[in-house]
Amino acid sequence: MAMKIVTSLTSPFGRKVRVVLQEKRIDCPLEVDIPWEETSHVPDYNPLGKVPVLVLDDGTALYDSRLIVEYLDTLSPVTRLFPTDKRGLLLTKRWEVLADGVTEAAVAIFLEKKREAIQQNPGWIERQFGKIRHGLEAMAHDLGDKPWCNGDSYSIADVAVGCCLGYLDLRFPAIPWRGQYPALAKLADKLATRTSFADTKVVEG
């Protein structure tokens, strides 16, 4: 049995894993599955019913993008994405958690707005938008004028932030984050030139 990645093409967390696979030059088949469709097989791999899922050669399933990308980083010495020093690793994972948190809030809003209008909770939606606003402000502040989130080196922090910003562009183009935070816009534009980001650009679906 060959290792494979199970995800939907519009999942920002699935994109994060796909970017890492390209950066690490790991050949891994992609199985497209939409977790909210009735015919989805995602629960067969992940009891939580979420993508992405990395199915290993022996059938073991790894879920949650943070666990998957950390595992993938151990498989190849190409483009190390996690620092080896404890302090650097801690700060890198802090970036990843922050970016993923903003992404989770955006995904939650998107799914809530798919419900009937009368079933939607405007107050809850606004709280999620608040997480996005505060998260973007924190990311822009921490990035400052550094070329990469970690300073001088590209890492999983940049992958997570780039996928987060790409998802906001896809689902919430009205959020003016580029004008508000030019440093984040500059980073996003730089990431867009990388093959891993260009090849995994999320399309509407």
Image (cartoon, rainbow, N blue to C red):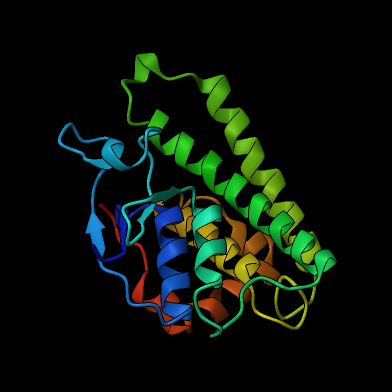
Q: Residue furthest right?
A: 87
Q: Residue at image x 78%, y 61%?
A: 91
Q: Is residue 140 left or right of residue 50?
A: right
Q: Where is the N terminus found, in terms of image quarters?
A: bottom left
Question: Relative to residue 197, is residue 90 depicted above or below?
Answer: above
Question: Relative to residue 27, is residue 12 depicted above or below?
Answer: above
Q: Is residue 122 left or right of residue 36?
A: right
Residue 101: x %, y % from top left: 61, 45
Of 52 and 58, which appears nearest the observer? 58
Q: Is residue 35 visible?
A: no
Question: Relative to residue 80, is residue 55 depicted above or below?
Answer: above
Residue 201: x %, y % from top left: 37, 68
Q: Is residue 21 visible?
A: yes
- Tally the marks: 0
Residue 205: x %, y % from top left: 25, 52
Quadrant assignment, res 143: bottom right
Q: Residue furthest front?
A: 58
Q: Residue furthest left?
A: 39
Of 18 and 141, which appears nearest the observer? 18
Q: Residue at image x 66%, y 50%?
A: 97
Q: Residue furthest top?
A: 118
Residue 50: x %, y % from top left: 38, 40
Q: Is residue 99 left or right of residue 72?
A: right
Question: Relative to residue 16, is residue 60 depicted above or below?
Answer: above
Q: Is residue 41 left or right of residue 69?
A: left
